[in-house]
Image (cartoon, rainbow, N blue to C red):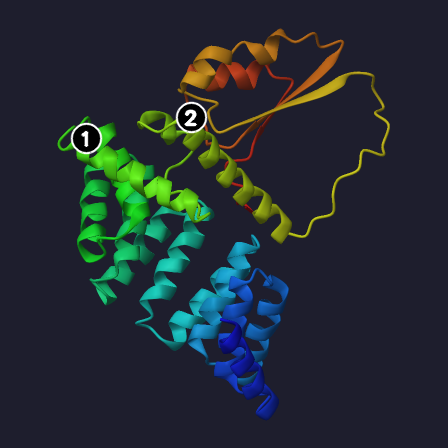
Amino acid sequence: VKEAEECYNTALRLCPNHADSLNNLANIKREQGCIEEATRLYLKALEVFPEFAAAHSNLASVLQQQGKLNEALLHYKEAIRIQPTFADAYSNMGNTLKELQDVTGALQCYTRAIQINPAFADAHSNLASIHKDSGNIPEAIQSYRTALKLKPDFPDAYCNLAHCLQIVCDWTDYEARMKKLVSIVAEQLEKNRLPSVHPHHSMLYPLSHDFRKAIAARHANLCIEKIHVLHKAPYKFLRELSTPRLRIGYVSSDFGNHPTSHLMQSIPGLHDKSRVEIFCYALSADDGTTFRGKIAREAEHFIDLSQIPCNG
């Protein structure tokens, strides 16, 4: 990578407006975590060559990483306008739409990417994830299996397929499947990669406690990295409260028909309002259940954040 970076820098010294070199150097900077420098280089490449589809798509990816989802969408759309058969741009735009909670739009993008390139394993896996999140488990299983046929060494697809099979209680080849899953996680942790198993899902598998702790730590570090990319200044508690009441906030995606709410639905209303002020922030839409209604009714403040895009 260092040699490649030196070559691109040499090319740009000889020809400062060489769009391909600007784009490729930006790709290296992005891999190195130099997001601002990568963004500057992508913008320079587009200034030189506005119809550069790959640079639009790459810039969109960096903007998405920074939580600038609407800006990212604009550049993905430009990439597709310039190159209508740009399967990668469709698939990545689907990921952005998924973050914006536009499931239908994401589904259409993944489907279009597969129409353009039926052998696009990542698009099949992304499509499977949409089906999985929507509760369409048989469709998810089919798409994950297609992805693995196209790319047998695909840890994310394999581990997500394993989770789907457990959801539908398919225990076929369970021992062999678990053995491979544990092997995948061990290799990822050894190489300091993000594990393909979610921390919560790790409890379902025959993993050691040390592995589970390491999985949780790596995912926690990812969250910290995403926050750092946003470049937001640390919050300082400089303002004295006008009321002596302590403000307590509950943030959850499970204010509804979920075990979390089954167990804690009465808690917001049981606080001593003379001493505390309760805020409940719902990350999921109203499912119309009595669990949701009770929490919303008894909490002093109930704020629905389900339509607010996630910035990391």
As drawn, the residue found furthest toward the front would be 190
Gap between marks 1 and 2 measured at Cα: 19 Å
Kind of residue sitting beneath label 1: Glu
Taking depth in this image into account, of 27 and 83 the one nearest to the observer is 27
What secondary structure is found at the residue carrying circle 1?
Answer: helix
What secondary structure is found at the residue carrying circle 2?
Answer: helix
Residue drawn 40% across and 36% down?
198
Residue drawn 60% across and 10% down?
269
As drawn, the residue found furthest toward the bottom would be 14
Snapshot quadrant of residue 203:
top left
Kind of residue sitting beneath label 2: His
- Disc 1 or 2, which lies upstream in sequence? 1
- Which residue corresponds to mark 1? 175
Give above or below for 28 relative to 94: below
* Mark 1 and mark 2 residues within 8 Å of each other at the beta carbon: no
Q: Is residue 152 visible?
A: yes
Q: Position of residue 183 (x, y in %)?
A: 30, 40
Left or right of 139? Residue 187 is right
Residue drawn 57% across and 68% down?
38
Residue drawn 19% across and 26% down?
169
- Which residue corresponds to mark 2? 209
As drawn, the residue found furthest toward the left would be 172
